[in-house]
Image (cartoon, rainbow, N blue to C red):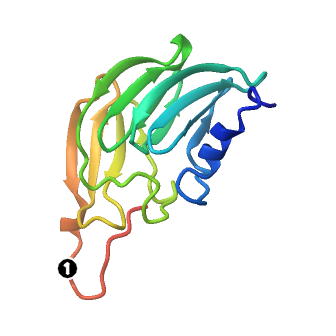
Amino acid sequence: WGHNNDTSRWAAYYFPIGHVSDYWRFITTDSLYLFYHGTPSQTLEAVDIKDGSSKWKHDLGTDHPVMAWHGDFLYVIGDKSQLKLDLQHGGKALWTKDNHFAGDAGYVMGGEDPVYRPMVLTDDTLWFIDGSCLSDHHKLVGMKTSDGTIVQTIDLAALVAKNAGESLVAV
């Protein structure tokens, strides 16, 4: 399906920074295709998978977040802002947080892939890595899905001996 013949927006999605494809910045639910696009400011957009119509948009600023979907909710975790969106009510934000995750470089630096930067959801928490191959710290962060409160931060780099030739790869 087409989307109002607006190819500039799709070009910004497929080639947001130079000619690097960001193919992993999307989630498909039972009824929506959720993705973010734009440069330098990012827009999260929900598109109906049946007819291609835009359902809603949300400004993400300059964040290049990790995203996860569970039930009727989309969790969007960026280095400057974090959100829980209600997919059944037009992407309404149920909570927002403004934690700053200093080691988070998003998905645009270091050629990282979601295989290495997933978000994991449990019944009541979400977990992600604050850090990248470009940062010198790597922290596992847990947040409550009910309100976005940080419940635990684990310094993964401290768990790895600083011996020559060793490095930390979080998968």
Q: Nearer the viewer, residue 96 or 61?
A: 61
Which picture quadrant has residue 120?
Answer: top left
Q: Is residue 124 visible?
A: no
Which picture quadrant has residue 98?
Answer: top left
Q: Quadrant of the N terminus?
A: top right
| x 27%, y 56%: residue | 103
- Vertical comparison of 36 with 24: above or below: above
Q: Quadrant of the C terminus?
A: bottom left
| x 28%, y 52%: residue | 140
Q: Nearer the viewer, residue 58 or 145?
A: 58
> Tag 1's secondary structure?
loop
Residue extending farthest right: 1
The spot of residue 10 in percent (x, y) is 67, 41
Answer with left or right where residue 106 lies relative to residue 146: right
Q: How many marks?
A: 1
| x 60%, y 45%: residue | 12
What amino acid type is highlighted by mark number 1?
A: Lys
The spot of residue 36 in percent (x, y) is 54, 37
The spot of residue 61 in percent (x, y) is 39, 35
Q: Nearer the viewer, residue 155 or 16?
A: 16
Which picture quadrant has residue 40?
Answer: top left
Answer with left or right where residue 57 lies relative to residue 64: right
Label 1 Cα crowd, 10 Å radius (few <14 / some 14-19 / many 20+): few
Q: Which residue is mark 1?
A: 162
| x 74%, y 28%: residue | 3
The spot of residue 71 in percent (x, y) is 53, 24
